[in-house]
Amino acid sequence: MRPELPSGTVTFLFTDVEGSTSLLSELGPEHYASVLADHRSAIREACAENGGVEVDTQGDAFFFAFPTAPGALAAAADFTERLASFGPIRVRVGVHTGTPLVGDEGYVGADVHRAARIAAAGHGGQVLVSASTARLVDVELTDLGDHRFKDLAASERVYQLGDEDFPPLKSLYRTNLPAPANPLVGRKKEILQVRRLLDDGARLITITGPGGVGKTRFALSAASEASERFPDGVWFVDLSPVRDPALVGPTIGHAIEADDDVVQHLRDMTSLLVIDNFEQVVAAARDLALLLGACPNVQVLATSREPLRISHEKEYALDPLPEAPAVELFRYRAAAVAPDVTFEYALAANICLQLDGLPLAIELAAARSRVFEPDELLARLERRLPVLVSRARDITDRQRTLHATIAWSYELLDADEARAFRAIAVFRGGATLHAIEGVTGADADLVESLVDKSLLRRRRGRLVMLETVREFALDELERADEAASVRDRHAAYFLELAEGANLNAGRLRVGGQRLDLAIADQDNIRRALEWTSDSRDLEQALRLLAAMEQFWVVNDPHEGVRRHAAVLDLDGDADPALRAEALRSYASSADIAGDGDLARELYGRSLAIFDELGDAHGRAVLLHRLGIHAMFDGDLERARVLVGGSQSLHERHGDIWGLAQTVGTFGAIARDEGDLEKASALVADSARLAEQVGVAWWHAGMILELAALSLEADKVDDAYAQARAGLEIARELHDYGGRVLGVGVLACVAGVGGDPDRAGRLWGAIEDDYVRAPLGGWPRHRAGCEARLVASCGGPVLDDAIAAGRHLSLDDAVALALDKG
């Protein structure tokens, strides 16, 4: 008979043998059985001597419970030392302390799951300890930092007993997978099947099924289970707000933190992409096929309501939940909202049958447990489902059932809740509470009520609707004849937000820019632009374009070109000043997209309008832009005249920000003329002026330009200090061009300083980054830096280090460049 299990605060200890299958093959069955028996004896004796109770054993794995944390660690230290001395078996150990419930079948609660996950992340001979256990012991522990583990919502601080070196933990350390709010129920067999497909090298697995079947949650779980196969990361790409197939590539790039071409970023990586909601942009499937063809070690898990029908694809159809797991899910979610209500198995099974086993439908119904008694809940489902069925002929029966479930939940809302529910559907990609309040008039209590009813969800500080729910709500919005007014308020709100982000480079306000605001709500701003264009509100559309000028430039200038072209092709009268602003903004995107001829034409058209209006500031901005073009064309005399004209206008109006730009450009002209001393003085003045008015990205750019000039003048110490200072700012701003320039200069500094390994790794990370902005600083200095690097430390060590550096991300390279070690 098993001893009584410890209760209250309990410390769990999990063990298993690393590489047991290969060890069995190596030793043979008889020898392996003998070694395994010795292993079991050592673990059982050590745990018993320190107060441990054996809870379970399966194969070569043990589960013990201890009344104290010191006892668990003492046992782990004891048997780990014994096993190391007499055999080939290497055991990994996880220790975690919590307050689990003790049921008839043993322990119940998240602490058991957490302890097992921590153990599974370790290596043979390694004892991993959770933060809760570490606080209760007084022994030497090595801090391994924060880690996320499969199916656990929160990250865990992990420690190691002793200071021996081991490989990195098998945790989700390179991922943006959303942390699940609840455990996945009833999908163990399916997860195993998808895991086998990934292990067999399937390039694209498309998880298909009706809306509400749980495709996203399933894909996230399958990806986390397979994470150790992908050393370069597991990345979640949410396509739910995307309707334009051309935006799929940029959306993938944003999710995987690619600063350059997505294919280039992934070409040499072993990564898994989880691409969610592909059915609405299925035309982009061909681009996905091209990506897979170019990136041989990338695998994709996609979710879609239909297969993508491209090469490499293996379709995996996800069915609704069978009865037992469906009941388990229903009871779990019902208990969360109504812990005092009991659902007998047969009744819960009948409810799930009425809901066709669809997880979303089950969760929506369970949320009503706080309102209805169990029998009443079933009765309402039985009465309403036959009535609330879509009459559309192009959807499946299960979709009709889901529609009916959502409709039923919708009818339970009061008038204010229903009005808010319909209006919130206008947001694409979710929204902040402030935006919802501003556009819909709903207050925090109404929003909270919709969250409680599972019609709205929180995700990373935003409130989002599932797309199936949002589609239903949009239909209701149209049916209520409220769509036009809500969309007008939506467009007005996001125009104000875009203009408040201060990204109009021609009308930049002193005090800082908020690119983060535009990035967070980019899908809503796109929707506002589409709506204003569709309704032919030309002036509002032009304002939005100009307000987002630097967003397009930084994130996707090609999209900026498309958006500007579409609006400026519209017929209609508009304020000439607005049209001039939009033309200049259009030229900015064309410039960074590499179409210099189009940019010059647009700058010229914008300048003509500003001149006709007598707008001196507009003229000054355009003269400077045209001057930069002349400089890059090698016409330094014309550049000097144009920039000088701009500077005179800025001086006349006391525009310090304008002067910061022209002074910096005069420094670049001096540099091209070979006068490094004059160039450095002017660039330093420009940096000072930019700092004075609070334009951080220009300030950083000028400091980095100064560093490059110092390096050219053999002032290596100055170059080092300046490059570090500029790179720190560029990293904070996530400024792509500034980070590349800073890493490049510091690579060269390291080479001149006699450290070819560091220099090569930094150079390899950015050697192909010719910067998306042809007017950026790096193309001006790259050739000189490369020549200096090769001259100072060229050879096999540098070549090997460059090859290694090609595997670093830009963020990794920046961290290395700023590491003084």
Image: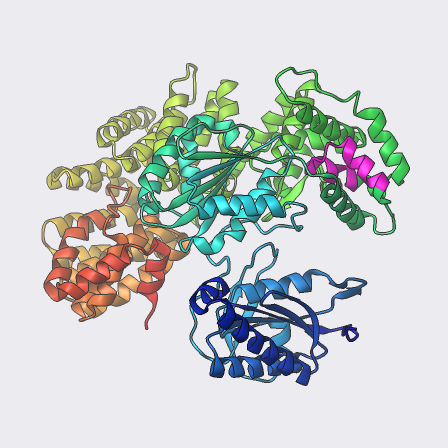
Image coordinates for residue 735, horizontal then vertical, percent: 36, 50
Image coordinates for residue 500, horizontal then vertical, percent: 50, 41
Q: Is residue 18 left or right of residue 41?
A: left
Characterize the magenta stretch by its predominant secondary structure.
Answer: helix
Q: Residue at x 32, y 59 (%)?
A: 813
**The residue stretch that appears in magenta:** 346-366
Note whether 663 is above or below 560 in the view shown.
Answer: below
Residue 384 position by quadrant? top right
Q: Is residue 66 visible?
A: yes
Residue 5 position by quadrant? bottom right
Quadrant of the drawing holding the N terminus: bottom right
Q: Is residue 239 left or right of residue 708?
A: right
Note whether 436 is above or below 150 in the view shown.
Answer: above
Note whether 533 is above or below 275 in the view shown.
Answer: above
Image coordinates for residue 662, horizontal then vertical, percent: 25, 46
Image coordinates for residue 177, horizontal then vertical, percent: 53, 49
Numbered label tally: 0
